[in-house]
Amino acid sequence: MDSGAGWHPEIERKFLLRAVPECLRDRACVEIEQGWLSAGDEPIRLRREASEDGERWLRTEKRGRGVERIEREAEISGEQFDALWPETAPRRVRKRRWRVNVGALCWEIDEFQDRSLALAEVELPAADTKLSLPGWLAPQVVREVTDEPEYLNVRLARPSPP
């Protein structure tokens, strides 16, 4: 997949969970708000991440579907984020994220705050990377949803409450 200037590959698999594993509940997490600007077929994502380390703001574009996509991501200022954020009101999600390193991989476990939904994602070095579910995660996995478009965050987005 040709990523072009500023674009890089994102190779990721996603899993639907019954619940967030209890072993993560006492660990530090990141509070995430993300919304999408309408921009043709490939909407632009704005994200605010708040953790014990502070806040950061990101602007991301993604292209493609399935395991292997390309993305371009850049940090933006809080002022830039605040100026654009109102435009995302029709398409937003709020979630809590735990990051867990297992060997060379980082698992991201998301618990959505506006619905009963938990997902696990893992970025891989190559699409054909062999993957084993960690023992702490496997009992919570319902099924893999990488190729199910309804589990894309942009599809899960809802209007923000007034």
Image (cartoon, rainbow, N blue to C red):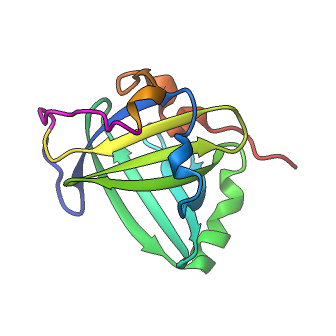
Q: Magenta includes 133?
A: yes
At a point 43% along the width and 42% down the height, the residue shown is 42
At a point 19% along the width and 54% down the height, the residue shown is 104
Q: Does residue 39 show up?
A: no
Q: Position of residue 33 (x, y in %)?
A: 62, 56
* Observer-nearest of 132 and 121: 132
* Observer-nearest of 9 and 97: 97
At a point 54% along the width and 58% down the height, the residue shown is 46
Q: Position of residue 124 (x, y in %)?
A: 21, 44
Highlighted range, magenta: 127-136
Residue 82 position by quadrant: bottom right
Q: Position of residue 62 (x, y in %)?
A: 36, 47
Residue 131 vertical placement versus 112 (above, below): above
Taking the image as shown, residue 111 lies to the left or right of residue 67, namely: right
Q: Does residue 121 show up?
A: yes
Taking the image as shown, residue 46 lies to the left or right of residue 33, namely: left
Residue 8 position by quadrant: bottom left
Taking the image as shown, residue 35 lies to the left or right of residue 66, namely: right
Residue 100 vertical placement versus 15 (above, below): below
Magenta stretch: dominant secondary structure: loop
At a point 53% along the width and 39% down the height, the residue shown is 154
* Observer-nearest of 7 and 94: 94
* Observer-nearest of 29 and 134: 134
**Which corner quadrant holds the N terminus?**
top left
